[in-house]
Image (cartoon, rainbow, N blue to C red):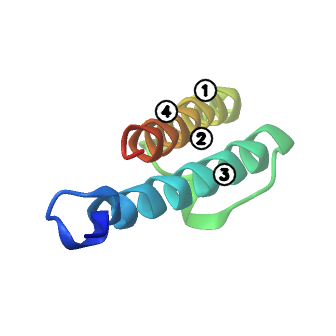
């Protein structure tokens, strides 16, 4: 019997691994854009009430980088645990 025939095998975690990897890559790209100071329209005004703070790009970039790294680590761990 193959391991794919058992429920709870490595194949059942594949959508989770793919989703975490995609989220991780998207947040890493978002962090790079924040650090580069690219004007991102609606994303640039999230969290601001009234006046736009000029120093918030570093904070958002750092938070995006952390979320991206955590998501990629979660994808790696979920994929590794399945073996």
Residue 52, label in figure: 2
Q: Which of label 2 and label 1 is nearer to you? A: 1
Front residue of 30 and 57 = 30
Residue 78: image location, x then y, percent: 39, 43
Residue 59, label in figure: 1
Q: CA distance from mark 1 to mark 3?
A: 12 Å
Disc 2 crowd, CA 10 A, few/some/many (<14, 14-19, 20+): few
Q: CA distance from mark 2 to mark 3?
A: 19 Å
Disc 3 crowd, CA 10 A, few/some/many (<14, 14-19, 20+): many
Left or right? Give the position of 38 relative to 5.
Answer: right
Residue 83: image location, x then y, percent: 42, 44
Q: CA distance from mark 4 to mark 2?
A: 28 Å
Front residue of 70 and 27 = 70
Q: Which of label 1 and label 3 is nearer to you? A: 3
Which residue is labeled 3 in the image? 30
Badge 4 element? helix
Q: Is residue 39 above or below residue 15?
A: above
Residue ID at (46%, 42%): 48
Mark 2 or mark 3, which has the lower sequence index? 3
Residue ID at (63%, 28%): 62
Left or right? Give the position of 22 relative to 49.
Answer: right
Q: Which of label 4 and label 2 is nearer to you? A: 4
Which residue is labeled 4 in the image? 70
């Amino acid at each position: 019997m193959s391991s794919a025939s058992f429920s709870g095998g490595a194949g059942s975690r594949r959508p989770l691994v793919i989703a975490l990897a995609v989220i991780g890559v998207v947040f890493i790209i978002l962090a790079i854009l924040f650090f580069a100071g690219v004007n991102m329209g609606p994303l640039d005004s999230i969290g601001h009430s009234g006046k736009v703070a000029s120093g918030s790009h570093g904070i958002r970039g750092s938070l995006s980088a952390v979320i991206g790294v955590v998501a990629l680590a979660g994808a790696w761990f979920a994929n590794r645990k399945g073996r």
